[in-house]
């Protein structure tokens, strides 16, 4: 392997010079409230896709740039618009597919934000706004890295490039496989860079090598044909809230670990990670204990976890002395690498039906399954990426990390492109609070991520 004849300092200088423009592009993108969930304006996601496509076309390096909307893979309806682009390689050179997503999570509780969620604000070296980190920064990393290598390499740009900027990652990527199948010729590649993960810290870069899978579903618990006066019948019949809370408690052991038989743990060594670091990263309140057993990073990366992410029931303001006939809850289960989501869901359903109290009726709906993934980090692309990360972070050694969150479509990429090397990178850090109020992006990480990707692409272009 040879290093690029273009020095790290030359590439760094170009990125520093263009960084203000990159930041303004990101701010403009954040201002578009491209929430891909049902119930939010689809035209905003379309507007976001058009914004990205316009910037991609302006690069002038792709043979075609398209906005595509494809049907859901397993249900009626169509997904959200994605941006696809391709430039074929010179003979003997590899093609790199760059992935990110332009859709975002809903803003959540407006009162919990210190500034407007869709009006980006800089504070203390960070950019605050919904999607600033997850994953509109990933989009702009790709755009800026591509612009940089185009300027530096000019006619010497030999590697092939493909771009896939998805529009519904935050809502289950339900048309993802349709896009892959219908546009395989555009997306076919030798190396896939997924810019949708995080870093060990602002000062330590990471390459993600494992992802937990995900099982998410809605569960409706019913006990009564109709609501009744709690004072008249309470104590003789269970209402749905009583049954639901009792059932949900049975998902956990006394120490907070998952109580479902059949959910596996992946056995692999993990770095040291102190409880103080956990408290710092999570905001755990004084006196509240952590949960689970084993090393903390094993719990976060390699063990199953269950979260109750929503409940449809009367609000406190609307509460009355009423026995509730049915309650619906949203359950999200993270699955350890090595277990399929379908197998995990079978064990989850069996456990819930076996432990439901008082014969309450259960109905499962909106089932969403995403498989876990273990990345092969021994390939030449990973070696080159680790080197680029080290140089971009001023000599800090990158770490290979697992991620407790899920990126289920990675398994779909591997299935469609089995010979491609997968690199999972990102712009987040422990303080980014993706999906939460006050989501933010470290501007230092943003700049370093751009530099790392540009270094990787230039060096790949000039390898023997």
Image: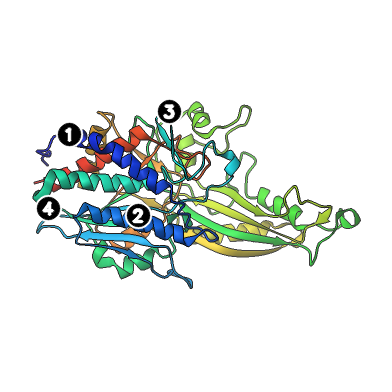
Q: For the residues labelled 2 and 1, say whether their Cβ atoms are less than 8 Å apart.
A: no
- Alpha-carbon span between mark 2 and mark 1: 30 Å
Residue bearing the label numbered 3: 124
Looking at the rendered image, the disc whose residue lies closer to the viewer, 1 or 3, is 3
Q: For the residues labelled 2 and 4, say whether their Cβ atoms are less than 8 Å apart.
A: no
Expressed as whole percent of the image width and height from the top left, the position of residue 448 reads: 29, 35
Quadrant in which the N terminus is drawn: top left
On the rendered structure, is 229 left or right of 28? Answer: right
Residue bearing the label numbered 4: 158
- Alpha-carbon span between mark 2 and mark 4: 27 Å
Expressed as whole percent of the image width and height from the top left, the position of residue 276 reads: 50, 26
Q: For the residues labelled 4 and 1, say whether their Cβ atoms are less than 8 Å apart.
A: no
- Alpha-carbon span between mark 4 and mark 1: 19 Å
Q: Nearer the viewer, residue 376 or 384?
A: 384
Which mark is on residue 8?
1
Mark with earlier residue (1, 3) = 1
On the rendered structure, is 85 left or right of 410? Answer: left
Looking at the rendered image, the disc whose residue lies closer to the viewer, 2 or 4, is 2
Residue depicted at x 29% and y 61%: 84
Expressed as whole percent of the image width and height from the top left, the position of residue 380 reads: 20, 46
Secondary structure found at label 1: helix
Looking at the rendered image, the disc whose residue lies closer to the viewer, 2 or 1, is 2
Q: Is residue 284 above or below residue 110?
A: above
Residue depicted at x 13% and y 55%: 93
- Alpha-carbon span between mark 1 and mark 3: 27 Å
Q: Nearer the viewer, residue 146 or 210?
A: 146
The answer to whether residue 166 is visible is no
Mark with earlier residue (2, 1) = 1
Residue depicted at x 25% and y 34%: 16
Mark with earlier residue (4, 3) = 3
């Amino acid at each position: 392997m040879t290093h690029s004849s273009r020095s790290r300092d030359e590439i760094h200088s170009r990125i520093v010079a263009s960084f203000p423009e990159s930041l303004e592009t990101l701010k403009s993108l954040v201002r578009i409230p491209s929430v891909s969930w049902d119930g939010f304006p689809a035209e905003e996601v379309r507007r976001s896709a058009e914004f990205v496509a316009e910037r991609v076309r302006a690069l002038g390096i792709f043979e075609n740039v398209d906005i595509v909307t494809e049907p859901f893979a397993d249900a009626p309806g169509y997904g959200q618009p994605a941006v696809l682009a391709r430039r074929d390689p010179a003979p003997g050179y590899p093609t790199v597919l760059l992935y990110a997503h332009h859709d975002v999570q809903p803003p959540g509780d407006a009162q919990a934000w210190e500034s407007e969620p869709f009006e980006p604000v800089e504070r203390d070296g960070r950019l605050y706004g919904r999607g600033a980190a997850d994953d509109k920064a990933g989009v702009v990393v790709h755009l800026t890295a591509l612009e940089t290598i185009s300027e530096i390499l000019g006619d010497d740009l030999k590697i092939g490039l493909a771009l896939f900027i998805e529009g519904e990652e935050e809502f289950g990527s339900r048309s993802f496989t349709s896009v892959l199948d219908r546009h395989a010729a555009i997306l076919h590649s030798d190396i896939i860079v997924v810019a949708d993960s995080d870093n060990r810290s602002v000062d330590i870069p990471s390459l993600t090598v494992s992802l937990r899978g995900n099982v998410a579903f809605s569960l409706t618990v019913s006990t009564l044909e109709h609501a009744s006066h709690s004072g008249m019948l309470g104590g003789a019949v269970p209402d749905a809230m009583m049954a639901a809370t009792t059932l949900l408690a049975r998902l956990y052991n006394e120490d907070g670990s998952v109580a479902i038989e059949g959910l596996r743990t992946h056995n692999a060594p993990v770095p040291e990670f102190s409880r103080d670091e956990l408290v710092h990263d999570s905001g755990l309140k004084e006196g509240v204990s952590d949960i689970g057993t084993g090393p903390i990073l094993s719990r976060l990366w390699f063990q199953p976890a269950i979260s109750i992410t929503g409940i449809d029931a009367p609000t406190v303001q609307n509460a009355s002395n009423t026995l509730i006939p049915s309650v619906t809850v949203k359950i999200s289960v993270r699955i350890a690498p090595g277990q399929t989501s379908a197998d995990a869901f079978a064990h989850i359903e069996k456990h819930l039906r076996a432990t439901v109290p008082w014969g309450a009726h259960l109905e499962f709906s909106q089932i969403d399954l995403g498989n876990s993934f273990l990345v092969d980090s021994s390939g030449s692309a990973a070696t080159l990426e680790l080197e680029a990360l080290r140089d971009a972070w001023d000599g800090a050694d990158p770490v290979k990390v697992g991620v407790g969150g899920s990126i289920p479509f990675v398994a779909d990429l591997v299935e469609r492109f089995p010979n491609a090397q997968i690199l999972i990178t990102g712009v987040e850090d422990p303080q980014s609070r993706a999906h939460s109020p006050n989501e933010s992006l470290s501007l230092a990480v943003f700049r370093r991520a751009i530099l790392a990707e540009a270094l990787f692409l230039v060096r790949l272009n000039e390898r023997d």
